[in-house]
Each structure stands twice: as C-alpha cells, then as structure tokens.
Amino acid sequence: TIITKKKPSRPIKIRMIFLGNLLILATYAFKCHGFHMDSFVSGSRIKRKIQTRPIIFSLYQSVVKSNEQTRRNPMKICIVGAGPSGLLAAHCLLKSGKQVSVYESRSDPRLLEKEGRAYALGIGIRGRTAIRSVDESLWNAVRARGYESERFDLYLTPKIKLRLRDGSKNKDMEPSLLLYQSELCAALLDELEKRYPNFRVNFRQQINMVCSNKNRVSLESSDGENTVAGPFDIIVGCDGVNSVVRKSIEHKSFTQKIQTLPGEFKVCQSSSLPSNIDSTAVSLILPKAGSTTAFFEPTGERGGCILFSTGRGAQDGIMSGNFTGDDILERFPLLDGVDLEELTRQLKKQAPSRASSVQCNIYHAGMLVLCGDAAHATGGVSGQGVNSALVDAAVLAECLQDTEPVTVQDALLKYSKRQVPEGKALYDLSFGPEGNV
C-alpha cells in the first residue's frame, strides 16, 4: 500500500499564511506595547512584507488606528506629594497633555501660618532651568516671591567676618533666589490654577498604600473616609524622605538605604532683620558659647529665616527649650534687632527635628517612579535638595514626552539612567565618596 501525503487545501494554506503573518504582526505589536507602532514598523522589512498582503495590511492599518486612538487618550498620572517637585511635575505633565491627579496629606500652604518648618530654600541655576522648562512666565511668578542674593558670609566672632562668596564679582551670573518653601509652593499652585482652571490639588488626602499590581492608591481623607483612586498609568512618588510610594516598591533589584543624620535643628522666621550683619547675604554665625550655630537667610522685606542647629551628640538649651531671649542674644550678639520675644516663642513651640539621608539604586520599578527626597535626600547638607528635586520633575516629564523610547517602561528606565548618577553625585558632594554621615 502506497501512502501519499495529502497536500493542504488552498483555504487551509491561506489560513496558515494568514495566521503566520498575524503572529509576526502580533509579535511586533506586543513589542511596541501599543506605543508608536506605525513609526516602529515603517521603514522596516515587516512593513514591506505586510504591504504585499492586502488582508494583513488592512489588519495592520486597523491596529495602527487603534494605537493612534490610544495615544489620543491622555496618559493618567498620579503624583503623591504637593511639594516643589510634585507641583513642578504637574506643570510639566499637564503642559504635555497628560491627565494628572495630585494628592497631598497636608493642608494648602497658602492657608497656613508661615512659621516653624516653613524653612527657606535657595534656588540656583539648576532649579531655575527646571522651572523655566515650563516657560519664563512661571519662573517670573516664582521669582516675585523671593529675594535674590549670591553673597555668603561666615562670622567666626561678632567682629571677624569672612566673605566666602560674593556675586558682585561676576555680574553676568544670575544670583540664587532665596524664598520659603511655602512661598515656592504657593507660586506654583497659583499658576497651576490660573493655567488649568479645572485642575485642583487634593489636599488633606493621606496616601496609606499603593497597590503597584493594580496601579491604584488607597486614600484617607481628613475626616477619616477611606477611598481608592485609580487605575493610573504611572504613580509618581514626590512624598519626601518617608515616601509611601518608595515603601511600596517590591522589585527584587530595588535597594534603598535610609540613615538618620546626627544633630538636631529648629527653624524660625523673623519679620525683622538683624542690625549687625549684612542683611543682603546668607550668614553662618558661630556662637560665643555653646554648641548651636545660627544660619540666617534673608527673604527680602519679609525679614529672614533663622535655622539653629547642633552637631553630633551635642546638648544645648536652645534645643531643649531651657533658655530665654537674653540667652539667645548673649550667644549670638549679631542677632540684635530681631524680635527676641517672637523668636523665643517659635523656638519653644517646636520639638527638635532630625534630618535623614536616602539612597536608592534605581528610581523606578514597574509603573512606580520616585522624585526628589523620595529618591535621594541629603538632609539639607549640600543646600541642593530642592534644585535636584525640581530637575527630577522636569527630566521625568521630558522622558515621558519623547517619541523615543517607545514604551512607558523605556521612558522610566531612561529617567533612572539620567537621574541616578545625579543623585549619587549629590550624595558624594554632601558626605564624601565614603558616605560618612
């Protein structure tokens, strides 16, 4: 008996060819993840092969059309934290057409009494460039809230002063902008509401948990009501050193190192300026007695910010609350002219604070991404924290806006590759390559 192999009928052969080509097309579609498939396929051999097969080419066109529709639907992004980096990220992402939701556990800074932890910041060239990435008008709105200065003085004694930096020697250099964190956030908030009338930050919404596998966040409002928001395409953690988003990352390759820095500090605001120092310069004042130093930062007509800090293991009455206004003046004669009664009230009202450092080896995992102190914190040692946080926000928006890479994961990987070295450089600048905090 002779057994002959039966050739497949023409309909079966057509179906096999169709399924084979469909498999090729599906493979490319999966690889492109629905993003910019047309630009990926065009110019490649697969496009030329598809064009010779009318049925497959028709299917290809329908897939591209579907992807175009997907691209027209704005990416949904959740930002946790309405500090400087979170608000600038909202500006950048809204400008590029993304759908943005911002959640903040604290109250609107424009409604709060501005004292205590509402400390002053210095925005340098990196921070200015990041804000200007939105437009010059936004920078002008921020600039109007602060005081420009490029001078830095060290007072070894009331009579011995060293000018460590003097911007007057380089008139082409734009000076640093000194302003309270609350004023920076207020300027960014005002501009957000002015430019996007339907946009509002969700204040007093505590993020308790981030469900990374479902891209949702669990919220608790100020009145104790629990809700779930999402799903989102990306969740951005701009929620500081104690980031809930960072704690939710469970990727096996993700590592983090958090350290409490030695020493304590308290921050006060003065509505009057010291009469014995240059009120246009940032000043570090060493005490006549005791271990506490005073760091004065002018903020224009509104006076200035004074940060009192002690070093490792130091015991001091200012931190414990066992002092009077006369004790402050005795230690820091250069602060004469400041309202000592008000200064004493603010200092005694506060508990001493301690700063922390944060190091992460990558700034994203899955659809979770970190910015600012959530990714890298140095506790204010270098004075560059706010500048780095603002740069993070601008770079993240830029990576998500680029036509290449073709997927969200590629965009977040690109963000990590750009910003992780920046974070490490900031850490080395603050503590040295050995990381001795």
Image (tube, helix red, strand yellow):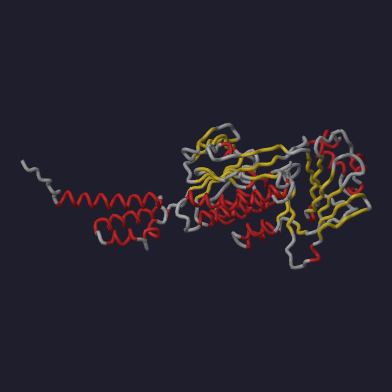
Q: Position of residue 46 (x, y in %)?
A: 33, 58
Q: Position of residue 397 (x, y in %)?
A: 55, 54
The single residue placed furthest to the left in the displayed view is 1
Q: Quadrant of residue 314?
A: top right
Q: Is residue 429 above or below residue 204?
A: below
Residue occupying the far top of the picture: 224
Hey, which quadrant is residue 163 in on the image? bottom right
332 left or right, relative to 307: right
For image coordinates 53% across by 46% down, the residue present is 101
Q: Quadrant of the N terminus?
A: top left
Residue 357, compared with residue 52, is above or below; it is above
Whether residue 45 is situated above or below residue 220 in the rendered picture: below
Residue found farthest to the bottom: 172
Residue occupying image coordinates x 69% and y 59%: 125
Q: Is residue 202 visible?
A: no
Q: Quadrant of the C terminus?
A: top right
